[in-house]
Image (cartoon, rainbow, N blue to C red):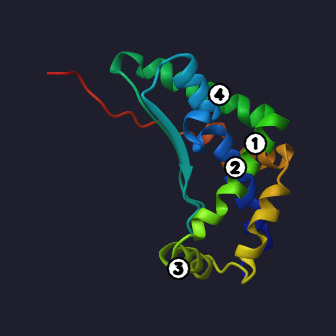
Amino acid sequence: MASAAKTRTIFPLLVGNHILGGSGLTSIMGEEVRNKRGLSYGISSSFSPLWVQGPWILSAQTKNSQANSTRQLMVALYRDFVDEGPSLKQLEAAKKHLVGGFPLKLSSNKKILRRIALMGFYDLPTDWLDTWSSKVMQVTASQIRRTFRRRMPVKNLVTVMVGGKKK
């Protein structure tokens, strides 16, 4: 059986990631980096929990001349998010969006099979799909802050920048 700690950790990560960058242009990163400052063509975040702790990726596409300032802003936004967490408004909007979109993750045989395979791979409880929405709705801002601090501390960030001069 999946450990209770693993299943408790996944939901704050899921909701927090959605708020910070996982919901695209409506996320904190999308709003601040792209919409307000125009520093990025696109920005997102995602994580892959894997069987053991996996990567969490923040990515942005920007001009070479703006790469450093974009990276600095992304790190600053991440630090603020870890320190302060999401606002109540951001938290409630994310939970509504995730729960409202959940049926679409089960809208075909292929998608259902993908979820069942994930349940088997991660040794998740058989009621995982039945309880998913209620567990998302139970996530608090303090759980998000605590989980991000413990699982993805700012000091462990690694930056990979790809680009070059135009020829």
Identify the residue position indicated by label 1 in the image: 93
Check the image and report above or below for 34 versus 140: above
Q: Is residue 94 left or right of residue 36?
A: right
Q: Give yes or no for contact between labels 2 and 3 (Cβ–Cβ under 8 Å).
A: no
Q: How many numbered markers are drawn?
A: 4
- Marks 4 and 3, how far apart at CA: 36 Å
- Marks 2 and 3, how far apart at CA: 23 Å
Q: Earlier in the sequence, mark 1 or mark 4?
A: 4
Identify the residue position indicated by label 4 in the image: 77
Identify the residue position indicated by label 2 in the image: 97
- Marks 1 and 2, how far apart at CA: 6 Å
Amino acid type at circle 4 is Leu
Q: Earlier in the sequence, mark 2 or mark 3?
A: 2
Residue 58 seen in the current view: yes
Check the image and report above or below for 32 versus 121: above
- Marks 1 and 4, how far apart at CA: 19 Å
Q: Is residue 137 left or right of residue 62?
A: right
Q: Residue at x 61, y 34 (%)?
A: 26
Q: Residue at x 68, y 41 (%)?
A: 19
Q: Earlier in the sequence, mark 4 or mark 3?
A: 4
- Marks 4 and 2, how far apart at CA: 22 Å
Residue 47 image offset from top left, x and y in percent: 56, 53
Amino acid type at circle 1 is Ala
Residue 10 image offset from top left, x and y in percent: 70, 60
Task: Please tell me how crowded label 4 is: few (under 14), some (14-19), or many (20+) other residues with Cα within 10 Å.
Answer: some
Task: Please tell me how crowded label 3 is: few (under 14), some (14-19), or many (20+) other residues with Cα within 10 Å.
Answer: few
Closer to us: 164 or 90: 90
Depth check, mark 4 against mark 3: the one in front is: 3
Residue 89 image offset from top left, x and y in percent: 81, 35
